[in-house]
Image (cartoon, rainbow, N blue to C red):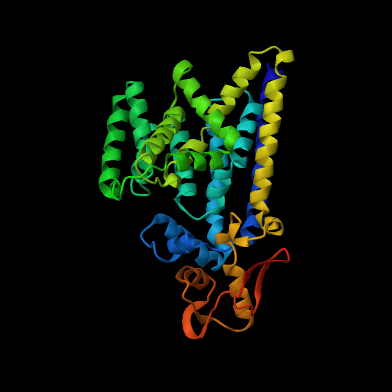
Amino acid sequence: MKDYGLKLYSIKNNDIFVLTIICALDLALLIYCTSTLSISYYEALVFFNEQDSILHKIITASCKLFGQNDFALRIPMIFFHIISVILLYKISKFYIKFHQDRIIAILLFVFLPGTVASALIVNNAGLCLMITLFILYFFHKNNIYITYILMASSIFVDSSFMILFLAFFAYGVYTKNATLAWLSAIFFTISLSFFGFDTQGKPSSHFIDTFGIFAAVFSPFIFIFFIYAIYRIWIKEKKDILWFLSVISFCISIVLSIRQKVQLEEFLPFCIIATPLMIRIFFSSYRVRLPEFRKKHKIALVFVFLFLFSNWLIIIFNPVLYNFINNPKKHFAYKFHVAKELSKELSKLNIYEINTQNYKLALRLKFYGISNGGNLALIENNNDFFVKKFDKIIHKL
């Protein structure tokens, strides 16, 4: 019995050590990536204009504490991400039996392009993801009162939590938990009355676009397996709250995309947390086979992780891609570049006020202390000086 206890203690500590290494490396590389990015126009809107949002208050508080710079802008998002990784690991214990499988589920989550985006881009996705995982964690720990308090608190955070309330309502009906179903329905109704539901505009199909974005956020191979996993659970396995949340979020976004353009950042956080389900399904299929028939599964696992890891490195070190692109504006992260470098060039010339007709660029420059106005005019493509990344000219001024 003593040896068994020591073995469990060793496994637990080994898991904590591996998780710490994953979080530390992830944190270091995300901070490095932050140093290569500029504030985008939509992030500048959050910082300057959306003064009623919780995210605005968090970001501005960070900038007051650390100074108005890119590190202070993005460190709250990175913090939300690291907490989310830890919470998902704890939640995965309720879905995955073997500790090595849980580590693989966490690695899969970390490497997903959508996860990296939520860790770096200033929008509500990262905050909603963390709050959702807190709610799920306390729900799985049977801390019902804390779960309900967090659910009630999330009502006014973002409209995307309506999906969470729908999932809990469906799960409450499925498990015949009347209290959960009724409270979830009440939370959903309050959230709907507060945020409303946008059905304006001319009906138009964005079905293919939505599928494309899902494939990009998951990566094509993982997206296909995600659909397979939620379908398999639907027809063969026990349905937990994580399944209800993922499948309802995915199905509603797909149905809505038939009529209108969907704000996918409101749905994607509830889908990418399905990694424990996908890993459980994969290794369940893997272990029912004799060792000599597991080769295809091993090859598939290695291939997918190499592909995801390569994509992850490309996102982290994205400025290198400018060396291989003829038109810099086609770079996937171009809208997150230029502004900081331009502000530095203007500061070298002691210019802190300049006229520009590009209102988006003007708002971005404002973050770096360059206001729109004065007697000088900013004329793009004037060739007075250049903005470079890795010795490649990406913008002429």
Please give left or right for residue 329 compared with residue 164 in the image.
right
x then y, percent, for residue 346: 60, 79
For residue 397, above or below residue 327: below
The C terminus lies in quadrant:
bottom right
**Residue 173 in picture, x, y percent from top left:** 32, 24
User: Who is closer to the viewer here, 134 or 358?
Assistant: 358
- Is there any visible trace of residue 240 in the rendered image? yes
390 left or right of 39?
A: right
Say above or below: 322 vs 212. below
- Could you tell me which quadrant the N terminus lies in? top right
What number of labels is visible? 0
Q: Residue at horizontal 59%, vertical 41%?
A: 112
Res 93 seen here: no
Could you say which is closer to the camera, residue 225 or residue 184? Answer: 225
Would you place residue 184 above or below residue 95 in this image? Answer: below
- Whether residue 313 sits left or right of residue 172 in the image: it is right
> Splitting the image into 4 quarters, where does residue 22 fall?
top right
